[in-house]
Amino acid sequence: MIIYDPRWLEALGDAREAKRWRASGIISEPQCAAIAARFTTPLYAPTLFVRIALFFFAAIAVGGLYGMVVIAGGFSGRRLAIFTVLCGALALVALDAIVGRRHLYQSGIDEALLYTALCFTAGGLVWLYLDASVAGPVAIRWLIALPFLVWGALRFADRLAAAAAYFCALGVLLAPLMEGGGVARAALPFATMAIGLLSYVLARAGADQSAWRPYAGCLLVVEALGLATVYGAGNYFAVRKANQWLMGELIPDGGVMPPPLGFLFWAFTALTPVAYAVRGVLIRDRLLLRAGLVTAAFSVLTFVYYVPVAPAEVTLTAAGAALLLIAIAATRHLRTRRDGYTDKNLLAERLSLADAEALVTAHALGAPAPVSAQPEGGGTFGGGGASEKW
């Protein structure tokens, strides 16, 4: 399904990993150059600055061409919607051909064409659906766009397309509950939490599968969005505002939700950041740790908004000072490694065949000689393990 050869992506990842090793001082510049020469790839992946520039140039070119044709043809209404869909379909075909021949990978040009094609195609079809004045469920609008977004994420391993597909899937699944009666709306937060938790679990399980390795970035995005969905669906402020929007009920700012739901969402707002942080510490997951810190800040803001114990500026200043002191204390405590944690930016260990080949290549093409003639470990790989003389 993916348009790129997975071996090319692995080679590109190894070359980038070698640059990280060089920046960390693990290997020398000649070794880094040797690894880059060994793991070459035809993929064109420019630097971030060039990527941004190419993205804007391509987007402006496509948008300008589309605008000129629309003005020259005098399209409007349904004709404009049909023309937009045709432009999107043409952009999809052109994108597939250009990427397949030129091997563009996160170059800015392919991303601009992808986002333009998805917006034109999905947006045009939804426009045609609405223009037909069909009184159908709201979920159909999301369902029209969902296949195109999923295709873009799977075909080009694009993170933004994956995020858009996630939100579109949420719309498909939750729209029927929003349009339902009181019982359906009452179940909406719990259904949203269940969907977010399931998305996180599935994305994390997929990240451990070698077949899904090219989609590692997309899966990480889905993990983060799943955690955000779980917390947002149970946050007291979010639930309350959603009730006001769906039911049209005006709840005073100082009021509370009727028990037991009010207490339940208050408890969820307080305990979810703790659960994220504790789970992140137990399994040493950086995403969970960061999610715990971010959601903790939102929980503090929620409690300050509804239960003010002091002026808002005083409370926020005190909370910020407390977090700063905690960060300073944690940094001083983690200057040395403690149970697998440290404040140093250590290189992540990746036990994959490609990384092993990179290490062997670096050793064979100019690694420094071992410290002693008989290194500890029984091999000739600088004491780090066995070689062909094991």
Image: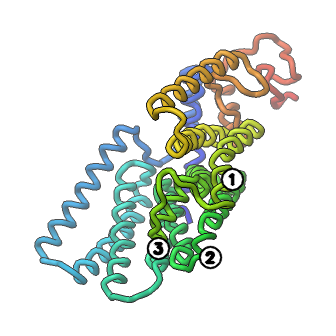
| Horizontal and vertical percent position of residue 19 | 54, 30
Tell me the residue that label 3 is attached to. Answer: 142
Label 3 secondary element: helix
Instruction: Farthest residue to the top: give it.
Output: 372
Compared with residue 7, is residue 161 higher up or lower down, i.e. above or below? below
Q: Nearer the viewer, mark 2 or mark 3?
A: 2
**Position above or below: 180 against 195:** below
Cα separation, mark 2 vs mark 3, equals 23 Å
Q: Using the image, determine if residue 282 lies above or below residue 126.
A: above
Mark 2 vs mark 3: which is more N-terminal? 3
Q: Nearer the viewer, residue 140 or 111?
A: 140
Q: Position of residue 304 (x, y in %)?
A: 53, 40
Amino acid type at mark 2? Val
**Three-letter amino acid code at disc 3?**
Trp
Between circles 1 and 2, the one closer to the viewer is 2
Measured as percent of width and height from the top left, residue 312 is found at 46, 35
Name the element at disc 1.
Answer: helix
* Rendered image: mark on residue 183: 2
- Left or right, residue 354 beside residue 310: right
Quadrant into which the N terminus falls = bottom right
Is 229 left, or right, of 372 in this rendering? left
Label of residue 204 in the image:
1
Residue at the spot x=54%, y=68% of the render? 169
